[in-house]
Amino acid sequence: MPSDLKTSLAPEMLPWLLGLLLVVLIAATLEGLVLSLLRNRSYDWRAYAASMGDTLGRRAVDALGLTLAAPVLAWAYSHRITTLELSTPTAFALLFVGQEFCYYWYHRMAHRVRWFWATHAVHHSPNDLTLAGALRLGWTGKLTGSSLFFAPLIWLGFPPLAVLSMVAVNLLYQFWLHATWIPRLGPLEWIFNTPSHHRVHHASNPEYLDCNFGGVLIVFDRLFGTHVRERDNIAIRYGLTQRLESYNPLYIAFHEWLNILQDLRVARGWQARWCVLFGSPAVHATTAAKDSARACAASSPP
């Protein structure tokens, strides 16, 4: 890795990130206390504990420094076509919009490509939508190369630290979207990703599957036809389409990888195996066992 990239990714931001993590942990805990003690609502504290376990496990895995994307990001920075400093509001706005565009496509592919879904399924595994559930992000994101979706921004010339910081801000913004007690926000719903939009995103109802992929903005969903509004006549069911009842953080982190391994064992031929790894998450072992690679490929458009 070039020395200048190492400098750009220096650990000065670590105390800030840890501080923000502490803030969101406190907020998630307060939500559970308020809902269960003051509003007498049912709150799943075992799911809360599982989300905290996922957070600790992810920090432990990240500490190992294993990442699939690092060599590509280093290459993109070394071969950048220019150098773009965030010295003007225009440059900052371009980075913000560019990051939103890249995040939209990462998030969309995380729902449409099983390799990425195996990690992202962890985030959708809680059967209730809570602030604690927002912290459940899985342990294998860096191992699957999810950061590759942001490599074009580094290749264009944005500093790696600026890109990674903007991604962190995007994820931090999405924390409050997991509060089910926040109502619709009127005209803001047209531009920004809101709790209403995100409730739909987390729904397992057939009417709501695979939509509202934006981070801070909802405009790319509107532009590319993946926006679905929350409907008063459809009660939202949260969680995966095949509900995950386990509270074991280890099983939660790897349950979809175990499903993939099971499907790979019964898949016949390399085309079917490729489909198991990179086809639609909706394809299961029965499809692979029948060697229905064509059906699998047809079911996984972007």
Image (cartoon, rainbow, N blue to C red):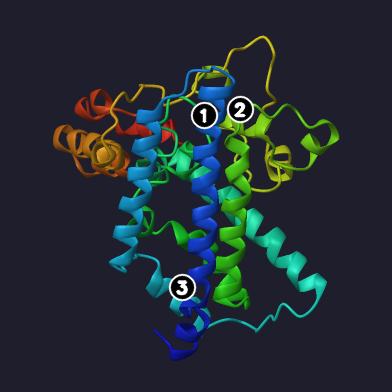
Q: Residue furthest right?
A: 187
When the figure is inspected, residue 187 is found, relative to residue 239, above or below; the finding is below
Which dot marks residue 32?
none
Q: In this view, does 18 lie above or below 88?
A: above
Residue type, label 2:
Thr
Q: Is mark 3 on a helix, strand or loop?
A: helix
* Callout 1–callout 2 Cβ contact below 8 Å: yes
Residue at the front extreme? 38
Mark 1 to mark 2 CA distance (whole Å): 7 Å
Q: Nearer the viewer, residue 101 or 291?
A: 101
Residue 184 in picture, x, y percent from top left:
75, 28
Residue labelled with disc 3: 73
> Which residue is under mark 1?
129
Disc with the residue nearer the chain's start (2 vs 3):
3
**Kind of residue at disc 3:** Leu
Q: Which of marks 1 and 2 is nearer the N terminus?
A: 1
Q: Which residue is drawn at 69% across and 37% down?
A: 194
Left of 193 or right of it: where is 249? left
| Amino acid type of the residue that numbered disc 1 sits on in the rendered structure | Leu
